[in-house]
Image: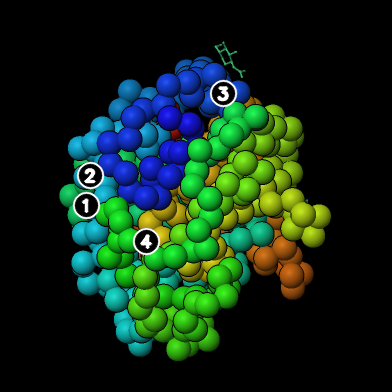
Amino acid sequence: MKVSSVVAATLLGVVGAAPLESRATYESDNLTKQGVVNLGFYVKKNGYPNPQKCTLDNTAQRKEWSTLSTAEKTDYINAVKCLAKKPAKTPAGIAAGAKNRYDDFVATHINQTLSIHGTGNFLSWHRYFTWAYETVLRNECGYKGYQPYYNWPCPDSCGVSLPPGNGGGCVKSGPFKDWSVNLGPVAPVLTDVKANPDFTGLGYNPRCLRRDISKAASQGWTKDSDVASLIKNSKDFLTFTTTMQGDFANGFLGVHTGGHFTIGGDPGGDLFASPGDPAFFLHHAMIDRTYWTWQNQDIANREYALAGTITLNNSPPSRNTSLDDIISLGYVGVPDVKIRDASNTLGGPFCYIYV
Ligand SMILES: *[C@@H]1O[C@H](CO)[C@@H](O)[C@H](O)[C@H]1NC(C)=O
Ligand SMILES: *[C@@H]1O[C@H](CO)[C@@H](O)[C@H](O)[C@H]1NC(C)=O
Ligand SMILES: *[C@@H]1O[C@H](CO)[C@@H](O)[C@H](O)[C@H]1NC(C)=O
Ligand SMILES: [Cu+2]
């Protein structure tokens, strides 16, 4: 099985896809492994942020989707579907399209889009958002595992074994064939998405889940060398987060946008409404794993590294992001945290690593 067909397995909901054979030979995975070793030495010397609560002996381990057993995959998918059957916490008067508990996440992301992308809080905000999702799946839908990620890379000469983009039709098979997308669009990539009754995208707009798996995005932007070079060549936080998020004016998508466009479709290709596709959280767990791996290359200097401002690409011009800035997830219903507390995955509310 080709590495990037993990994407297909994930997106199409193929339960029981064979584990990958040769992932360990990837440079980007080697960097993650080296990061775990560095982390071990670092905590040995400096101690843990919450030694009573979280150590490397009891930490949760987030795993790659294809390494889960069939039973684990089914548990995860069932918990996601369970979330979409629970009532929303977002009041209808605030977001009429938030029909269920899953939609609380989508509405929160749409509502804050302009202050969480191209900003200093991009990585910490999405780290906390993904953690909140994992926690709600566990606490409200009985999920026993942790948030899986999908490992983007394929080899540098990748003949990616993905089906070609099919134009973004409805998902007609797999566990999410009856999934209802209720919110958005705000900034769709497909031209024929039914407009939302509310200009905010928060109105009720039920429609099918559509995907447009893109070989070009996967092959062009999320290869092993793309991920490894992002981790190795980003000497400071600003370079890392900017390279990851892309430099569109110069035609550089970066792994973040490349991963979103690998999924594509509606709402996957919409900057605002993209969490409406459950694949969002597997992609963002990989974003977080890449951030974590980058931090672990030089923990002393990168644990609390931060740069950027509080507006999208600093437009309009705004102040610098601060470690004391609050991450608030609205009706997702988790406590507010400071960026500082979302900087270490063994500290603050967290206790997880990636394997
Ligand atoms: C990854 O690490 C293994 C074991 O140290 C090594 O054999 C392999 O060559 C490395 N792969 C890359 C692409 O760096
Ligand atoms: C959007 O954010 C504003 C400001 O924090 C808040 O008052 C409002 O309830 C939020 N709406 C949603 C849908 O979360
Ligand atoms: C904002 O951060 C930049 C570096 O990221 C720094 O050069 C600048 O002085 C900071 N501005 C303020 C007002 O602190
Ligand atoms: Cu986002």
Sequence order check, earlier mark of 3 and 1? 3
Which residue carries the number 3 mark? Answer: 26
Left or right, residue 70 beside residue 276:
left
Secondary structure state at the residue bearing disc 3: loop
- Residue type (three-letter) at the residue carrying disc 3: Tyr
Secondary structure state at the residue bearing disc 4: loop
Left or right, residue 32 beside residue 66:
right
- Residue type (three-letter) at the residue carrying disc 1: Asn
Q: Which of marks 1 and 4 is in front?
A: 4
Q: Where is residue 196 in the image (x, y as percent from the top left)?
A: 47, 84
Question: Badge 3: few (under 14), some or many (20 or more) residues near its Cα, within 10 Å?
Answer: some
For the residues bearing labels 1 and 2, Cβ distance under 8 angstroms: yes
Task: Report the disc number at residue 171.
Answer: 4
Residue 270 is drawn in which quadrant?
A: bottom right
For the residues marked 1 and 2, what is the alpha-carbon distance in whole angstroms?
6 Å
Q: Which residue is drawn at 33% across and 48% down?
A: 13
For the residues bearing labels 3 and 2, Cβ distance under 8 angstroms: no
- Residue type (three-letter) at the residue carrying disc 2: Thr
Question: Badge 1: few (under 14), some or many (20 or more) residues near its Cα, within 10 Å?
Answer: some
Cβ at disc 3 under 8 Å from ligand 1:
yes
For the residues marked 1 and 4, what is the alpha-carbon distance in whole angstroms?
17 Å
For the residues bearing labels 4 and 3, Cβ distance under 8 angstroms: no
Which residue carries the number 1 mark? Answer: 78
Q: Is residue 319 visible?
A: no
The one nearer the camera, 281 or 163, is: 163
Q: Residue at x 41, y 26 (%)?
A: 20
Please identify the residue farthest to the left as the structure is shown: 142
Which residue carries the number 2 mark? Answer: 74
